[in-house]
Amino acid sequence: MSNSVDEKETEKEVVSRNFIENIIDKDISDGNCKKVITRFPPEPNGYLHIGHAKSIVLNSGIAKEYGGIFHLRFDDTNPVKEDMEFVESIIEDVKWICGDLDTDHIYYASEYFDTMYECAIKLIKKDKAYVCDLSADEIKQYRGTLKEPGKPSPYRDRTIEENLDLFERMCAGEFEDGSKVLRAKIDMASPNMNMRDPVLYRIARITHHNLGDKWCIYPMYDFAHPIEDAIEGISHSLCTLEFEDHRPLYDWVVHELEFENPPKQIEFAKLYLTNVVTGKRYIKKLVDNGTVDGWDDPRLVTIAALRRRGFTPESIRNFITLSGISKAQSSSDYAMLEYCIREDLKLKRPRMMAVLDPVKLIITNYPENEMEYLDVDNNQENKAMGTRKVPFGRELYIDREDFMINPPKKYFRLYPGNEVRLMNAYFVKCTDYKTDEWGNVTEIYCTYDPETKSGSGFTGRKVKGTIHWVCAETAERAEVRLYENIVDEEKGVYNEDGEVNLNPNSLTVLKNCYIEPALAEAKPKDSFQFVRHGYFCVDLKDTKKGHLVFNRIVSLKSSYKLKD
Ligand code: ATP
Ligand code: MG
């Protein structure tokens, strides 16, 4: 389905069943599935990104829906690129997205190496696997092409005894890396290239992060994965479309190994985001060359970055649901993710006043050395959130863009002679202003009308503009970071050299912002609406005692339209 859905269609989408649920429903009613068990099988070789979230949400959601079990399984069978740092970050990310993770169901594929070895022996004994001495290049040549069948390896007819002996010696470390492999004996003429005697095991003297130097042979993905699923009793192995051509091999492995209740592989389309960098390789480059501040830079779409930026797990789950589960490849809009976070925070977060680009406003007829505390709703659309006291006094800060000396037509904010409402407070009328030698406004002078206090029921006259403010005496300082897409959308994500086309304005740092005193107690990861500016989250990395840093999660204005 497309990524733009109207609201009615969205509701329908949520209640209607996707093609995977239809398959599972049938398996259950046919008596072919007693318990639904799914898994998310990341390789611990990098941070998870929004694409992985689709697989997590889908797999954990299916398990929950059918009263089944969801496994997090580290696919750590390829020791070259794996790292413990990634294991920990992945656990944290999966926990966060799911809201919870049963740690009894975290698995490591490397713990199955003994079983995989036994599986290989079983295939050899059934004359379904053989040791082959061809080099990698020769294997490729013998494999043939899509148009021509392959040729059998000269080692294909080794006896079972010879194969057992050679395989055991491969495992014992008698042979050089790359000098021999174990291959499945299937069909060198199969129209599916994956079935032309694929390699099952290779010799590689690499230290494994979990097992050290215990093994010098390692299983290939297409052999290891179905065995991992079968050992864990996975009922439905959900993977992305590129594995469709591998399914016959998956089925062959679980069939020849005679697993009871073998798992069923089902493929779905990956999540792609338009104009967004998701490739691990590209993100790593941006991290390594210092373009971004680590894997969790809020401009990225790793899970760690989205969390730091202030996205909620609910918004991500909702986004995945809205983008749909199907076999058709499509690309979703980042604006839809923004729509989901706005919707999630709208009624849950307090709406506070913050001035990002301050200029002083002085109310000349307000008594000197006096202050008052105004009662303000925390969220006008959700009265259950209560009220707070907001200090008000003679000197305030307002945002620079809310005042103009020579306004254009239809500018309803403050300018000399004009009257506006100060949000939650009084009407003020601009009587004068002061500029520095370059013409920048340094102070704005107003008078206020005490009759016009918010909530007083004043109906005497109306004003067209309402602006926000903070009281100068009690305001707290804060740093605010505004983000745009890191990609230059006009140029597209990558240039001819495979580099990311960077948007030079992707980060704006405002160091001199003023916030309501009620915000001074905010803690890392807390989020708020700053009225008229958007939703903001306290940065968890750079916030220090006495130095609050806010990341803008999303502005209030939507460029995303739910289509009608
Ligand atoms: P990448 O290369 O994009 O970083 P990967 O596929 O190499 O990702 P894995 O650790 O192998 O990373 O992925 C774990 C699981 O997440 C796999 O089952 C994979 O199919 C799934 N997955 C990865 N990217 C996406 C995506 N964009 N949409 C949906 N599922 C995905
Ligand atoms: Mg992968």
Image (cartoon, grey):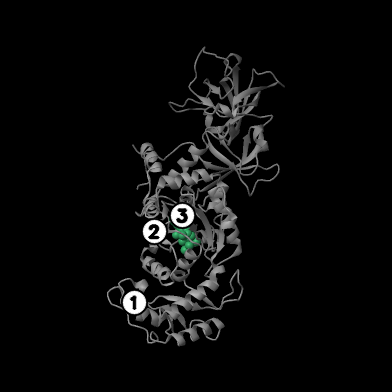
Q: Quadrant of the C terminus?
A: top left
Mark in the foreground, 1 or 3: 3
> Which of 411/314 is in front?
314
Q: Tell me the distance, in whole angstroms, between the alpha carbons under discs 2 and 3.
A: 17 Å
What residue is pinned by disc 1? 187
Q: Is there CB contact under 8 Å for labels 2 and 3?
A: no
What residue is pinned by disc 2? 267
Q: Is residue 362 left or right of residue 156?
A: right
Residue 221, x across and y down, in percent: 46, 69
Q: Tell me the distance, in whole angstroms, between the alpha carbons under discs 1 and 3.
A: 33 Å
> Which of 319/252 is in front?
252
Q: Is there CB contact under 8 Å for labels 1 and 3?
A: no
Q: Residue furthest front?
A: 31
Mark in the foreground, 1 or 2: 1
Above or below for 471 versus 117: above
Classify mark 2: helix, strand or loop: strand
Q: Tell me the distance, in whole angstroms, between the alpha carbons under discs 1 and 2.
A: 24 Å
Label 3 beta carbon within 8 A of ligand 1: no
What residue is pinned by disc 3? 36
Residue drawn where x is 40% and y is 86% of the image: 155
Of pointers 1 and 3, the one earlier in the residue sequence? 3
Label 1 beta carbon within 8 A of ligand 2: no
Q: How many marks?
A: 3
Residue drawn where x is 50% and y is 19% of the image: 463
Residue 539, x across and y down, in percent: 61, 45
Q: Crowdedness of circle 1 by 10 Å Cα count: few (<14), some, many (20+)?
A: some
Q: Crowdedness of circle 2 by 10 Å Cα count: few (<14), some, many (20+)?
A: some
Mark in the foreground, 2 or 3: 3
Classify mark 3: helix, strand or loop: loop
Q: Is there CB contact under 8 Å for labels 1 and 2?
A: no
Residue 6, x across and y down, in percent: 36, 38
